[in-house]
Each structure stands twice: as C-alpha cells, then as structure tokens.
Image (cartoon, rainbow, N blue to C red):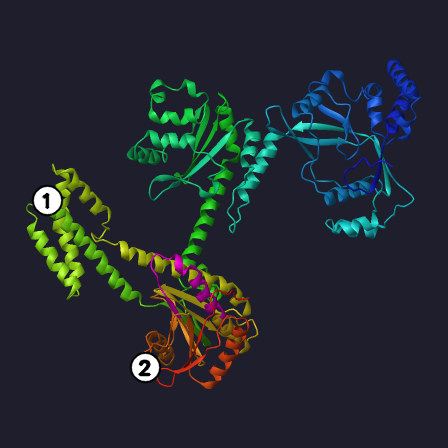
C-alpha cells in the first residue's frame, strides 16, 4: 500500500473523484438547462471506463496517465479565462502532492527551478498529525472546530526572492470514514483530547496511524501575501531579543528582500551616540549589516558639519531616497568619498533616520546594485514596521545598558553572585516604598557567623627587581644622552654635568626624589633642547640618534624598557592565576554557596567566607568548610604547577610563593557603602585582618628565613586540630603525586600582638595535573 504522505497520519489516503462525479450525476438528471445536462453526461461517459477515478487510487503515475481527462473533468472548477490570473491546483488532501495547475501556478513553479519541492511551511510532524485528527473530529464527528493554523507555501521566484503564498483549501470533494481498526472515542474522550493538544501520544492512542480513510481531492488556491508574511517575520525577529545572548538574526536580509521585493538588497544600521554626537556600528551585526552609504556620508562631511546635521534631524528628519545613483549631481560624483559607492556597486539606496521623542536614535540604510530598486513606494512600505524598528532599537539599547551594568558590577565592584540576593531584597523594599511615596532608608548589608578562608600566591622579590630594573633603565637613558651630547659638542656642557651628578646618585647614594628630579630635568630642559635640534640643520647622524632616543622614551619622559618587561610578566602571572582561581570557583560554588573575592597586585590573593547566612534556604554544616578547604589547597597547588609550565616564557624570570591561613573563629562581614566593598565588621573581627596583613613577610621563629618559599605551599594555623585536618588533605594530594613527602613543621615568629602561630610547609610536585 502506497503512502501518499511524507509524514505519519491517522489516514490512508486515496485519490478519488467520486464526490465530484456524483455532482455531475445530479446535474445530469436534475438540471433544467439542456447544455449543462449534455455537458455533465458527456463527462460521465468519458470516465465510465476508468473505474479507478471513482473508486480511488494511490498510484501517482495515474495522475500523469489521466492528465488530459482530469483536466477536462475539472474544467468547470478551473475556468480557462482565469488560468493566467488565479494560482490554483487540485491536491491530495493535506499533502504536498498537487496537479491540474492553472497557467500562473505552472509559471511560478517553473521560475522556482526544477529541483524545487513544494512543502508546507512551519508545521512539524506532531502538529500535522493532530491537525489531521482535528479534521476527523470536524468532518466525521461533526465537532465545530475551526482550525486557526494558517498554511503557507514558500516559493522562490526567478530572481531568488522568496515569495510567500497563503493557502485556502476547498474540501467539498473529499470524505473521511473509519476502517475496521479505527477507534470511535466517546464525547468525554474527545473533550479530553481537545484539552491536550500537545500530547501526541494521547492523540495517537485514540486515533492510531492509518486507521481512517481519507478519499477524494481538494482544490487549493494560493494568494501572494509575501509582504504580510515578511512583515510578520520582521516584527518577530525584532521582538525576540535574548538579553543573555544578543546575537543577530542572520536571516534578516532575506526577509527584507522578500518584503521590499528587491533581489540584491543590503541593509545597514548605525546607532547615534548622543553624548559624543557620532554614529557607531552595532558590533553583533558587523558581519550582517553594511554601512556603505553611511560611510560615504561620514567621509563626505567634516566633523562639525556632521554634528550640525545630527542637530538638524531634531527639526527635519526626512528620509533620503535615491532611485538611480547615476542621476546624482556632478559635484557629488566628483567627491572623493563617492568612490565608496562605486567600489561597493551601489546604484540605488534609501537612508532613513530613526527618531524617538524628536531625538536621533539611529540611521538605517538600504542599498542595491540594481538601479531603481528603491523609490517612494518602497519607502512607504517602511512605515508599516518603523515602530517595530524603534521598539527593537530601544529594547536593544535597554538590554545593552543592562549588560554594561552587569559588567560594571562583575568587574568593578565586589557584589558577588552568592550575596546579590540580599542586595536585591533591600533594593526591592526601597523601590516598593518609592512607588508608594513612602520614605525608606536603605539598611546595611551584613552577614554574620561566617568561617573565613584566606590564601595568596605572592610574586617573590618584585619590589627589589623593580628597583634594579629602574636603575638599568635610567642608566641606559643617561648613556644614550651622553652619546648624543658628545656628537653635538656645543652648548650642552651643562646637561652633561647634570647627567653625571644623576648617574653618581643612581649608582652610589640614590635619594628618595632622584627619579623625580631627573624626570623634571628631562621634561623641562633636555627634551625641548633635543626637539629643537631636530628642527634645526643638524647632521643626519645627530637626528638619527635623537629619533632613536625618543623612540625609547615613555610618556613620563623616562626609559621604561626593562620595567615594562617586568610589568608584562607580573600582568601575565596575575591574569593566569586569577583566571584559574575564577574557573575553580565554578566548582567550589557547587559545594556550598559562599562569598568570594580576589585581588591582583604583585600576585593574587583571595578571601572566601562560608556560612548559613550566605544561603539561608540551604542546609549548612561544618562539612562544607572542610570540603572548601580541600578545594582551596588543591586549587593553589594547581596554580603553582601551572605557573611552572609558563614561567620559562615570561620576559622576566620570577617566582611565586603561596600561603593558606586557617582560622576557626567565626567573623562578620559588612558592605561598606563608602568603599563599595565588603570588609570584616567589628573590632574583634579585625584581629583576623591584622594577622593576614602580617603573614606575608613573616619569618620562621628563630630564623631569618621567611615562612613562604617558592615551589612550596605554606599552611598557617593555630592549633593541632587544624594540623591534623590539613595533614589529611596533604596525604590525599601526596597519593595523587601532587605534593612531595617532605613536610616541614614550623613555628611562626611572634608578630606584633600575635603569638602561637604554627605552620606546615610542603613542596609541590612539578608538572602534574590535579584530577
């Protein structure tokens, strides 16, 4: 048995002309007009030897075999006088199989190309099946169901423009009846089905596949509604802005081609920056939009003329339409910027300012290489979705501002995701009070009884290196100036003497203000003097030396080459270590939500605060502290190993030393409005901060050696309980070959007001990845 549907359906389908032949039989015996009786009788006689036309068939080759007979049979339904105007065909019910086309329909399919297959638009398999079931309910069960689902064919024309045709269906000559396998559901079942339109399994239970017969044919008529469908698509694409994923609709250009009926169309848009009074491209659409006309316009006028034009838009925002570029005035064609239009093969265009509250929001352009593609009528079509463009741009601007605010919050403030809920709750109270015209004072944001975790990876001896590299830079600069002045040999003795004094200070008895005084001398005297030499008739050698010298001078008038290499190395270390810490936080937050902050200076330090106050809706216990402590130790070891892998590629060789401080007492933190950051709250809690600040340079008790050491991790704590806990963590990482078996047990020197600190220190295995 042939299946005439590509999709599964509750029908077996047979092509049949029985119901139409029955109409002819009625005319034959009942019509009073003799010519109609004779006509009906003639058609019936011509088909009486082809019983399959009445009984029904599934062999599609018979459509070709009986093509002329079917055309003659259906002549009353397809008048010859309308064949070049109507888009009409016979069809197998609810399928894409069509036949007996009008001439206009034939020409449309011919222009679409021989490989084109006609298919219904935007209906999936499940929707199709349920629609077929609804047809059974409507025809056989006499339920008053009016389908609101419109059917469309999308057919390209010979220029490649996608045309959209709405389909109307006449089903007068088709019938539906059950097979022996069909189920006849009760009224209550039908009601239940209609309440569950999306439950395909339920529909297939009561209307099994191919359990009904659909016999006959339908007549489909097509109406060109390209503009309406394209307009709907345009509105949909403009409304659907995902604030989490501001990505362009890359099909937008094709939709615009259909709407304006322009085969080769390009679309461009630039936003107006009101503050800086200039046009800006929309970054996400750079690969979709073109801005050739706007580029031409920008390059034609100077900045002041452009600003004046923008201001004039407030009073006259009339669009510009150029049907044929070749008709432009000669002086426009002679402008250098006119080459932009020639290079991009633009022969017709429209430029439309988008205004909101009499202020310029954006400018859009439409261009085409085909002359006369745009005119006043095409501009009129723009009015139908101008409001949607305005809505879309306003919403895009709103969402962009939201995203910018989110970036500011993420990158420039310390309001972490784990605590944002409390800020939001307080902000909601303030907002609701303002709506009710009530006075509300924002309350302090604080979290109590938290367990803190602190750690850092410090770049060792960075200050000393920076000092030594500063000496190298300044000595090289003085040497370069000596070479230049030795060539000049006139009126430069005072500068040579001053440089000798500075060179002696740098290498023997440097003072606190030596660098600043040298900088002033260079800025106020030596550099203006050298600039003058470049403008005078100096020798080529002198000018070359002076130019080479200035090429090495930084904005603060000093050589900065060696210190720049150090700063680049420190930046690289900070970025890589901070990125690893941030990535690891994704895993850590899954253990239990906690407040996290990190700081970059000469190294990276971080603070973690965990407790029930951070996530009051979740069950909290001390086991989460232990899990987070192990995560912290593992992550810092990973950071150390990663540092060793990229250390050799740095401009300046550096080392880092890492430390973890274990503190058991609970502390409170409070958001300081003046500093826009969290800090420990109360005098008792400040003891914790004092210890943190003094650990960096602390030494082993009775020794001049610092407790931190490159290649090792140091864990500082107070009691034996913490020692036992961390020895367990260390043992786990030793089994993973992450830490070496060389644990040192240390006492930390007494710090001001702080005694009794202990430490253990262990080497980190090189080049192993933590699992």
Q: Residue at x 55, y 26 (%)?
A: 263
Residue 488, numbered label:
1
In screen coordinates, is 117 left or right of 554?
A: right
Q: Nearer the viewer, residue 151 or 453?
A: 453
Q: Which label's residue is closer to the chain start, 1 or 2?
A: 1
Q: Is residue 412 left or right of residue 19?
A: left
At horizontal 32% and vertical 34% (from top left) the residue drawn is 306
Question: Relative to the observer, which residue lies in front, 759 or 289?
Answer: 759
Q: Label 2: which residue?
A: 703
Residue 342 is situated, as x and y percent measured from the top left of the image, at: 42, 24
Depth order, front residue of 745/337: 745
> Which quarter of the figure is the N terminus placed in?
top right
Q: Nearer the viewer, residue 150 or 693?
A: 693
Q: Position of residue 305 (x, y in %)?
A: 30, 32
37 up-or-down from 22: above or below: above
Q: Which residues are magenta?
A: 634-657
Q: Main secondary structure of the magenta part?
A: helix
Local packing at callout 1 (Cα closer than 10 Å; few below 14, some 14-19, many 20+) is some
Residue 771: x and y in percent read: 55, 66
Image position, residue 620 (x, y; %): 55, 75
Contact between marks 1 and 2 (CB within 8 A): the answer is: no
Relative to 29, say whether 414 is above or below. below
Q: Secondary structure at mark 1?
A: helix
Is residue 503 found inside the magenta-colored segment of the image? no
Residue reaching furthest to the top? 35
Query: Is any atom of residue 400 visible in this view?
Result: yes
Where disc 2 sits, the SS reads loop
In the image, residue 364 above or below residue 37: below
The total of numbered circles placed on residues is 2
């Amino acid at each position: 048995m042939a299946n005439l549907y590509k999709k599964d359906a509750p029908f077996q389908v047979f092509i049949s002309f029985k119901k139409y032949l029955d109409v002819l039989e009625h005319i034959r015996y009942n019509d009073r007009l003799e010519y109609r009786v004779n006509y009906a009788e003639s058609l019936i006689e011509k088909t009486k030897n082809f019983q399959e036309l009445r009984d029904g068939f599934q062999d599609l080759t018979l459509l070709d075999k009986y093509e002329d007979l079917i055309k003659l049979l259906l002549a009353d339904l397809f008048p010859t006088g309308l064949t070049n105007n109507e888009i009409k065909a016979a069809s197998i019910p609810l399928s894409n199989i069509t036949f007996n086309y009008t001439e206009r329909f034939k020409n449309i399919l011919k222009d679409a190309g021989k490989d084109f297959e006609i298919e219904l638009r935007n209906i999936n398999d499940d929707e199709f099946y349920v629609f077929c079931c609804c047809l059974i309910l409507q025809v056989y069960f006499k339920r008053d169901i009016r389908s609101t689902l419109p059917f469309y064919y999308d057919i390209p024309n010979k220029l490649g423009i996608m045309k959209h045709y709405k389909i109307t269906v006449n089903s007068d000559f088709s019938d539906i009846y059950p097979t022996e396998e069909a189920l006849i559901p009760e009224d209550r079942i039908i009601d239940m089905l209609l309440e569950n339109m999306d439950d395909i399994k339920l529909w297939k239970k009561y209307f099994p596949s191919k359990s009904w017969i659909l016999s006959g044919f339908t007549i489909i008529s097509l109406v060109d509604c390209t503009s309406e469908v394209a307009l709907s698509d345009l509105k949909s694409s403009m409304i659907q802005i995902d604030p989490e994923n501001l990505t362009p609709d890359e099909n937008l250009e094709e939709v615009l081609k259909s709407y304006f009926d322009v085969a080769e169309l390009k679309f461009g848009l630039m936003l107006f920056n009101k503050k800086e009074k200039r046009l800006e491209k929309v970054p996400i659409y750079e690969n979709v939009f073109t801005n050739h006309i706007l580029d031409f316009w920008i390059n034609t006028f100077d900045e002041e003329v452009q600003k004046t034009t923008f201001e004039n838009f407030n009073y006259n925002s009339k669009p510009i339409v150029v049907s044929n570029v070749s008709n432009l005035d000669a002086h426009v064609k002679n402008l250098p910027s006119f080459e932009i239009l020639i290079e991009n093969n633009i022969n017709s265009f429209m430029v439309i300012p988008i205004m909101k509250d009499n202020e310029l929001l954006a400018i859009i352009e439409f261009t085409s290489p085909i002359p006369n593609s745009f005119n006043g009528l095409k501009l009129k079509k723009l009015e139908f979705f101008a409001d949607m463009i305005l809505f879309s741009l306003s919403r895009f601007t709103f969402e962009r501002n939201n995203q910018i605010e989110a970036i500011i919050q993420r990158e420039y403030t310390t309001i972490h995701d784990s605590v944002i809920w409390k800020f939001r709750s307080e902000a909601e109270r303030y907002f609701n009070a303002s709506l009710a015209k009530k006075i509300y004072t924002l309350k302090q944001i604080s979290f109590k009884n938290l367990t803190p975790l602190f750690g850092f990876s410090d770049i060792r001896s960075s200050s000393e290196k920076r000092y030594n590299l500063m000496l190298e830079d300044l000595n090289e600069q003085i040497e370069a100036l000596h070479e230049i002045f030795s060539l000049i040999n006139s009126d430069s003795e005072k500068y040579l003497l001053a440089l000798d004094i500075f060179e002696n200070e740098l290498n023997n008895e440097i003072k606190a203000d030596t660098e600043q005084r040298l900088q002033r001398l260079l800025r106020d005297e030596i550099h203006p003097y050298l600039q003058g030499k470049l403008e005078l008739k100096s020798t080529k050698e002198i000018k070359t030396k002076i130019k080479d010298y200035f090429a090495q001078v930084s904005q603060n008038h000093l050589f900065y080459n060696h210190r720049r290499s150090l700063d680049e190395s420190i930046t690289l270390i900070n970025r890589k270590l901070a990125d690893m810490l941030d990535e690891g936080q994704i895993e850590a937050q899954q253990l239990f939500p906690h407040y996290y902050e990190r700081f970059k200076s000469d190294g990276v330090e971080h603070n973690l605060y965990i407790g029930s106050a951070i996530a009051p809706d979740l069950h909290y216990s001390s086991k989460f502290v232990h899990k987070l402590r192990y995560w912290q130790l593992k992550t810092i070891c990973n950071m150390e190993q990663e540092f060793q892998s990229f250390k050799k590629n740095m401009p300046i060789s550096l080392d880092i030393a890492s430390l973890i401080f274990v503190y058991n007492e609970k502390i409170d933190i409070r958001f300081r409005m003046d500093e826009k950051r969290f800090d420990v709250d109360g005098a008792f809690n400040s003891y914790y901060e004092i210890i943190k600040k003094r650990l960096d340079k602390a030494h082993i008790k009775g020794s001049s050696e610092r407790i931190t050491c490159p290649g090792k991790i140091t864990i500082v704590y107070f009691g034996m309980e913490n020692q036992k806990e961390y020895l367990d963590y260390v043992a786990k990482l030793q089994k993973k070959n992450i830490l070496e078996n060389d644990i040192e047990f240390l006492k930390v020197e007494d710090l001001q007001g702080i005694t009794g600190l202990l430490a253990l220190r262990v080497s980190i295995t090189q080049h192993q990845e933590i699992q």
